[in-house]
Image: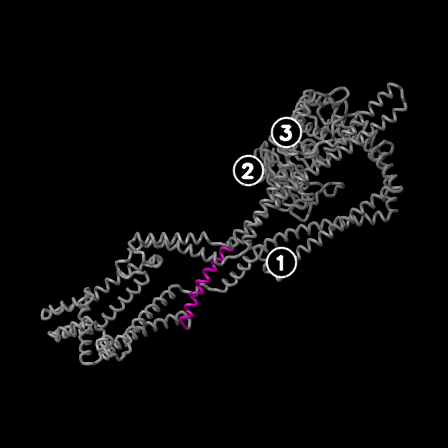
Amino acid sequence: MKITKIEIFGYGHWIDKTVHLQPQLNVISGRNGSGKSTLMSFVLSVLFGFPNLRRKHQRDYDINPENHFGGRLYLTETKYGDVMIERTRKNGKQLLYMKRDNDKDRVQVNDFSDLLNGLSKADYLNYFGFSEADLMDFVWESEEDFAKSLVSLGVSGRQVLSKITPNLQSEAEKIYKPNGKNPVLNQQLDRLAHNNQQINDAKQDEDQYYEYEHQQAEDIDALDALRHEHEMASSEEIQLELAHGQENSLNEYISLDQELQGFDFAENNSEVIQKWRQVSDRIQRLNDERQELQPKTVTNQVDKQSQANEMSQGTEAGVNWISAHPENLDVMYAQSKAYRNHLNQNADASEELVKKRYEKDQLLKRLGADNDEELPNELPDDEREKWQKEYRKIQNRQALLENESGPYSEDKQALNDLNDEEKQLRKEYNELRASGAPGMSWVVYLGIVFGILGIIILIVALAASGNGLIPVAIAGIALGIIFALIGMSLTQKNKKEYRNDLKAYELDFIDIKDERQQLENAISVAPRPENNDVEAEYQTFEKQLDELAQQYGATESINSKVWLEDNYVTQIDQLNKEISQMELLLDNDSFTDSAKDQWEDYKATLSDNHLSEAAIYHQFENDYLAWREARANKTYQDFAAQESKEKIDRIDEQIKQLEERQRQILEDYDVQNADELEAKADKQQQMLEKQKRFTILANHLDLSLLSYIEADESVDEQLMEKRDEIKALNEEIAMRTDRLSQSRSEMKRLANAGQLEELSAQDEALASEALNAAVEWAARKVAIQVFEEATMGETGDANSLVMGQAVRYIHDLTDGRFDKLQYTDSGMTIHTSDDKWLPVEQLSRGEKALMFIALRFAFLNAQLGQIQLPIFIDEAFAHLDDGHLENVYRFLADRGVDNQIILLTTDQPNMDGLAHVAKQEI
């Protein structure tokens, strides 16, 4: 049977608690008072019944009667398959329920004994549960008592039980009886109680001793609180140092956050801004055109030809041709005037033609082209969008680099220094590990030498009947023992210092790892001092864009970035079509036959032979008027001014309409003028850039540090105060540590003075005598209990099975040091790997503990193999050293395959690499 889940409704301080278990070894760790023993008590209470709170000396584990009391266990691999059992208590009555796989609802039952093979709670704990107290009961100080307790562990059948149990009971009663007076242990306990009373009286006379004791307890509590406060202050110091490193960026984050919260992006409409700018550009073009039509100042000059040129739009070549060809001038002028009348009839079309030509010229200038032949082909929309995205990305990075600043170099240097420090520590750590743990101290070997010399002198003295040498021999042996004990103590101290040094290095590596992560985070958000990479990327982009434009037919004068902005080439093509249509509309007259030769001759005279007929008509009219003005010494300025005035009036009307549209945009957009509108547009663009910067900072900064930035004091002031606080705590800890050391020294002095020392020595002797008697009594009582409850075999084969399993287990637990066990008339002996048989009484306490574990599990496997119930181990190995603990945990992991094992401990065992192990902490 195995437990898969524990549900506690209410038990002790556990309320609504669920614990999941694995089918093999489960290690549940926690500090003292965390509820480990309460958890074990709950499982036993559900299986065997809740304890009676009214019974004296009953362990109730702080049961809280106010809560819904009880809970459930989920079991598997039972005789019924998967089962849920529940035990609760209501109005003093215990209610039991069971639910199997095939049951729809839970069923009330009387007990769960059929799931437990009929075992009682006491039997279950004897077989499947043990604690440190159970283990220490078998690790006796007396070698003889240990041999007896080992025999009574329960490796024999019931035939032996019927012979030895009465004798053991009789011997136990001679040693101790409850409420007895004559048994040896009863008398020793009375003397021990009397002596303890005398010791208490002696202590009461030493008021100073208790004053120091009270002060010591107070200092210990204060030191615990100060160390906890020191740990919290050190942690906060690290946070403040991080905040100091990111202070500029965090302040920028706060400023951007406040600014962005007060800005509503919804108020700005990019379409309105675009429309405003289009209207403004149109007005600017019309104003430029209007400026060109303004009458120019006429200056009096002697040269009539120059005056004529200034007064009209006549050309020098045209005027000279007219002067040389007076025939048919009236006919040709009539034809040109007829064209003007035709032009006046199509004034609107002419105005639009002027506007289209102006728009085309502006687009050509923006692209950097002088004529249509220099233009490239249009860029496809998807290709244009791809290049525009890349261009914006580079611009954003340039803007980010221009805005960023911070201690980038300092953090980078700190990271390099940290890496150098880690390399040095790694080197020292590896050298320390390579040197290995310190070996046996030389003092041990000195003690061995003294001991051997003492034994040799003793042998010589006994052989030569020299009584005078015997005290010398005894002194040598005593010195050897003393030096050996001191050497072993020094060896353990050196090993402990070695382990502490290794742990200190490992803690340094953890601190370096945390500090490196903090520096890397700071470097990732700190502004770089140079932007050479982005500048190179921008230049590469410009070069690639120029090459792309040339691939599409552009000349070197074309501005590729303007070409990328919009479909300007398409717009120019469209304007060309519209201009051609308007010119076709306006130029529907052609030269008449009556003066065709003169027209061709006049046309050849002009410098531009590509003029349209309409343009030639217009130019002839200007030249004719200039000729007449020059001939009649009369200015043509009045006529040109009138024509310009009419055009200006039309342009003013268009400007008025466009300004009305601007006024409507300002009114709809709730602004007073263009400056406010442009300011809002610029503001929105600035806020968009700030929003991007804000997002970058939010993704890279540790925002938990904002509380330090937003505090009333600066981060430097907070850091200085925190360091002062840590310094004060260190001074307080040092002071209390010194005082604690002094108080302990004084207490030791008082304890060693006067009657207290004598009574303490006497108490120790009495306690030793009582312990020996208790060992005798306990050995017999434990043997009786084990023979009665733990023995289930009916033949001598059970002994062989237990011994066989125990040999394998002790071999595994001691890494092969012991490989055989045997019973003899004189007791139990064990065979070592160096081919020696040793009495088990000579084993160390740790080896005795391993012997006990091997025999307990051997008994379970050999005699209770058919009963597979969970094994509970409650803090049984706290006294074992690291080497023994490692073997025990590995052994338990292997045994967990057969029986589910639940180990409750305050340790944090290292079980890395062990299979079938589940760890959890409560």
Instruction: Determine the secondary structure under disc 3.
Output: loop
Return the mark for residue 716: 1
Q: Nearer the viewer, residue 798 or 490?
A: 490
Q: Which residues are magenta?
A: 673-697
Instruction: Determine the secondary structure under disc 2.
Output: loop
Tell me the mark number nearer the camera, choosing from 2 and 1: 1
Residue 727 seen by the camera = yes
The residue under label 3 is 867
Task: Locate residue 899 relative to residue 832 in the image: left or right.
Answer: left
Q: Quadrant of residue 154?
A: top right
Percent across and percent down for residue 637 are 24, 78
Residue 793 seen by the camera = no
The residue under label 2 is 103
**Which quadrant holds the C terminus?**
top right
Task: Locate residue 293 relative to residue 81 in the image: left or right.
Answer: left
Q: Earlier in the sequence, mark 3 or mark 1?
A: 1
Does 202 appear in magenta?
no
Tell me the mark number nearer the camera, choosing from 3 and 1: 1
